[in-house]
Image (tube, rainbow, N blue to C red):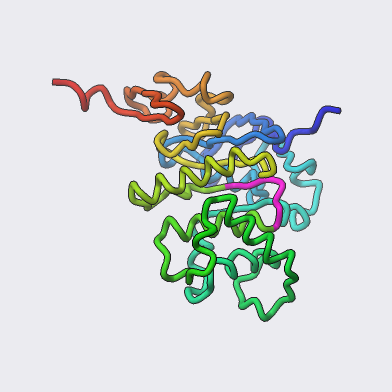
Amino acid sequence: MTQQPVVSLSEVGVVRSGTQILDAIDWVIEPGQRWVLFGANGSGKTTLLEVVSTYLFPTRGTVDVLGGRLGTVDVREMRPRIGFVGPVPSSLVRKHFRALDVVVTGRHASFVSTRWHHYVEADWELARECLRAVHAENLAEREFGTMSQGEQKRVLIARSLVTRPELLLLDEPGSGLDLGARERLVESLAALAENPGSPPVVLVTHHVEEIPPGFGHILMLAAGRVVAAGPIDRVLTNQALSEAFGMELRLERLGNRWRAWSPQDRSG
């Protein structure tokens, strides 16, 4: 039996204060797929992620998420089924919490001490399993405030998995990380992508170097419109990358990773 798409967008447009932010977006995410949502700053990535997360209704078009159509379903019932990691949650976590506590409290979508809710041993084991899924099991007993920014982000991704979401949205988790932390995060996301039990994932980034192995599809935006969408090996090209950033760029494949540069940087 054919499974229905996890996400299906048709002719989606978003207008804010008279400005067209997204225009005629078509996008289908099938079960088990890992997508990269890619484009320059201001291309509409965050707005599109807000639409998929059900927190922003489009100005036009139709949006189906997890079998429900925006405008016809109670999104408050849908949102707990969607895991989201963005720039805000880390500021809400109490710095003295252990990583294991940070993750397990995600079961109740809270940032309060574990003594305020009842947790059984299965909850704690699930929290450990989620830390292992992103290669962060070694952080379990560490206080959140003693961790690097990259370590904190891996813990928050584990937290988002503890509710067993049906869709996981990651909004630029590599932002602000140094090279080492970024590479450890990419490694963790690659491990997540390889796990057949993990949900469909959408990763937002504007650096091809941050695309983890195992993410097989990409949607590229420029000025709110789709430049290219589909299997990453087919649609991530010099032409598409150059169109997305409005300048001539080149791609290089290094094993299962990517690198980009401007030919002008290598002239002379």
- Image coords of residue 264 (percent x, y): 22, 24
Residue range corresponding to the magenta coloring:
163-169
Q: Residue at x 42, y 26 (%)?
A: 255
> Quick check: 248 left or right of 156?
left
Q: Nearer the viewer, residue 24 or 94?
A: 94
> Quick check: 187 left or right of 72?
left
Q: Residue at x 79, y 43 (%)?
A: 68
> Quick check: 154 left or right of 261?
right
Q: Residue at x 55, y 45 (%)?
A: 47
Residue farthest right in this picture:
1
Q: Quadrant for the N terminus, please.
A: top right
Q: Is residue 78 magenta?
A: no
Tell me the quarter of the picture where residue 105 sits: bottom right
Tell me the quarter of the picture where residue 200 sits: top right
Q: Is residue 32 above or below residue 81?
A: above
- Image coords of residue 237 (percent x, y): 44, 20
Q: Residue at x 66, y 44 (%)?
A: 198
